[in-house]
Structure formats: C-alpha cells, structure tokens
Image (cartoon, grey):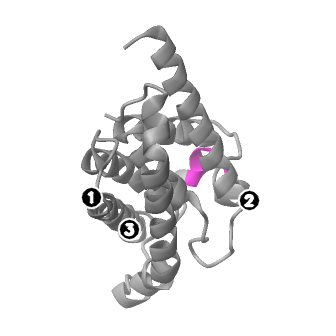
Amino acid sequence: MTLKTNAKKLALIGLFLALLIVSSVVSKIPMYPVPMTLQTAVILCSAMLIGGVETFIVVAIYVFMGLIGIPVFAGSGAGIGYALSPTFGFIIGFAIGGLVTGLIAGRKTDASWSRLIIAAMVGTAIFYVVGILYYLGLCAFYFGNEINIGKILLSFWILFIPSDVLKGAVAVFLAKKTRPVVAKMGIRAR
C-alpha cells in the first residue's frame, strides 16, 4: 500500500467517523429505552465500502471519544458511565457487526446484490444479538432487574425491524453504487 492510498483510507475512516457521530445526534428519534438513529446505516455503508477492519477502527475511535467525555453518543451522551447505558451494547455490536459485514461483503468491486444484502442482514443481526445480550447482562448482574424477554425483544428489536429493513436497503443500494468509485480511488476493502 502506498502512502497516497493510506492517506485516502485514513480520510475515509475520518469521513465515516464524522458520519457516525452526526447520525447519532442529528437523526435521533426518541424511543425508550433505545433511540432510533441512522447509525446502523452508516456502519453498514462503511463496512461495505471501506471494509470491516476499517469500520472496526471507526467504531473503536467513536467509543474512545465517547468514553473520555466527548458527547458523541446518541442523546449527546458521554463519559465512562455510558457503558451502563442500555444502548452501549449496540455500540459494541457495531464494531463486531461492522467487521463481519465487511468480511462478508468482500473486496470485489462488483460484489453481487445478494452478497451485499446477506452482509447487511448478518451485520444487523449481530448488532441486535450483542446489544440485547449486553442489556440482559446489565439487568442480571448490575441492575438486578427482573428480566422479561418478551418486553426486551419488543423494546430492543421488534419495534426497529421496519426501519432497519429500510436502512439496510439504503445502505446496500449506496454501497453497490459507490463501491466502484471507492475502488477507483485505489481503496480496497479488507
């Protein structure tokens, strides 16, 4: 990899970090206990365009910024205490799901629609599995709350299915149409 390619990749990491921050604050639709944002679409696009490893880096920087007190999390949340928020597990899921989405999407510029759709579906499923398991862990081991699986699935997953299908479709469409442009820049997803 050349220095020029590294600079372009770093610029794209910065771009997706900025988009992730903006999407967490600007696009927030208040729902309890997890707000609806455009973050999932940003993570999926990032993973399918610049790669899973780079998306993992984007999320790691985002988490670091938030935990040191920069208000980047949904609702302008920040600080180490945010790790006890119901939404923090989803942020961890973004890192893992973004990595896996990028790996499934692969490096081919002309990845098929079905490959990108599967990548987005698997990534989104990982967001939810990690987020819900994290919340269950908080309830059981930290808050000592009674766990009602039905309510948790409704509040953390079922209500979000329609919007996540739409966000996933938009992310796949944008990725499919812009992957050739990113490839022409000399950037290859990992």
- For the N terminus, the quadrant is top left
Calculate the distance from the C-alpha at mark 1 to the C-alpha at mark 3. 20 Å
The residue tagged with tag 3: helix, strand or loop?
A: helix
- Few, some or many C-alpha atoms within 10 Å of disc 3 (few <14, some 14-19, many ≥20)? some
Disc 2: which residue = 26
Please report the residue visible at 51 percent of the width from the left and 65 percent of the height from the top: 170
Residue 39: x %, y % from top left: 56, 58
The answer to which of marks 2 and 3 sits earlier in the sequence is 2
| Amino acid, disc 3 | Tyr
Residue 38 drawn above or below residue 68: below
Q: Is residue 79 one of those drawn in magenta?
A: yes
Calculate the distance from the C-alpha at mark 2 to the C-alpha at mark 1. 30 Å
Q: Which residues are magenta?
A: 78-82
Disc 3: which residue = 128
Q: Which mark is residue 115?
A: 1
Calculate the distance from the C-alpha at mark 2 to the C-alpha at mark 3. 22 Å
135 relative position to 28: left or right: left
The residue tagged with tag 1: helix, strand or loop?
A: helix
- Disc nearest the viewer among 2 and 3: 2
| Amino acid, disc 2 | Val
136 relative position to 165: left or right: left
The residue tagged with tag 2: helix, strand or loop?
A: loop
- Disc nearest the viewer among 1 and 3: 1
- For the C terminus, the quadrant is top left
Residue 153: x %, y % from top left: 39, 83
The answer to which of marks 1 and 3 sits earlier in the sequence is 1
Asked if one can make out residue 67 in the rendered structure from this viewpoint, the answer is no
The answer to which of marks 2 and 1 sits earlier in the sequence is 2
Pointer 2 with pointer 3, Cβ within 8 A: no
Please report the residue visible at 33 percent of the width from the left and 58 percent of the height from the top: 116
